[in-house]
Amino acid sequence: MPTMDPHMLKPLTGLLLSYLLGSIPTAYLFGRGRGIDLRQHGSGNLGATNAFRVLGKRTGTIVLCLDILKGALAVLLAINLFYETGAGISPSLYACLAAVCVVGGHNWTVFLRFKGGKGIATSLGVLIAFSVLIEKFGLLVLIAVGLWLIVFLSSGFVSLASCVSSLALPFLGLALKLPSSITVFLTILAAFSLIRHRENIRKLLQKRESRFNTASLFKKLFRK
């Protein structure tokens, strides 16, 4: 009977833990703590945007920060604790695999029958982690976040901002001449975003998508 290469066991464990960390349904847990199942309220999505709408700015902000944190943490733990040089895989590619696992876990959590969020906050956490590991990646993150803010503030649509900034990722990777494995990974992140936003895209085309009043939003955010 064939046996697993011992050099592969540790890296595979890291990928599994990345998925499980991503699968922690932060928004759902905060909602249930207040007797609310977010799957039955607002957009039904288990992400920071719906948490902000249904649970309020404070809880929404906490959910956003925790979703970002689990994305960054998964990548950094994977590369620092679970990567094995003898596994026949480069550190950058392994970090990409861990990133895909944590975002996939958030989007399709095993704890809630594979119904999760849309992965934008967790993807941001992943990108922040990559900015620590890869030269020039910090510039990519700044441009992507800036693009998200421009689209959101000008349109009021979170979904549109998320799709536009996600689609820009692989092109930014090419423009900055990042390794091909990183550009492929960024393409996967963009694909994840489009898949999870397909209903929002349909509503945008039909002019039925919910939008934020950005002026009112700023008043709520900075109200004492």
Image (tube, helix red, strand yellow):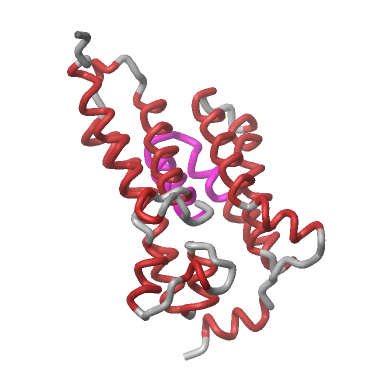
Instruction: Establish if 221 lies above or below 120.
Output: below
Q: Main secondary structure of the magenta part?
A: helix
> Residue 149 is drawn in which quadrant?
bottom right
Residue 154 in view in this figure: no
Instruction: Establish if 214 lies above or below 14.
Output: below
Instruction: Establish if 5 lies above or below 166.
Output: above
What span is colored magenta in the figure? 120-142
Residue 40 in view in this figure: yes
Work out which quarter of the rendered image holds the N terminus and state it. Answer: top left
Image x and y of residue 130, in percent: 42, 40
Image x and y of residue 28, in percent: 40, 66
Give the residue furthest to the top.
1
The answer to whether 115 appears left or right of 102 in the picture is right
Of residues 185 and 196, the one drawn nearer to the viewer in this rendering: 196
Of residues 39 and 185, the one drawn nearer to the viewer in this rendering: 39
The answer to whether 144 appears left or right of 205 in the picture is left
Instruction: Establish if 64 lies above or below 97.
Output: below
Magenta stretch holds residue 99: no
Of residues 130 and 119, the one drawn nearer to the viewer in this rendering: 119
Give the residue furthest to the right.
206
Residue drawn 22% across and 9% down?
2
Q: How many marks?
A: 0
Image x and y of residue 138, in percent: 49, 44
> Residue 85 is drawn in which quadrant?
top left
Residue drawn 51% across and 74% down?
52
Of residues 108 and 118, the one drawn nearer to the viewer in this rendering: 108
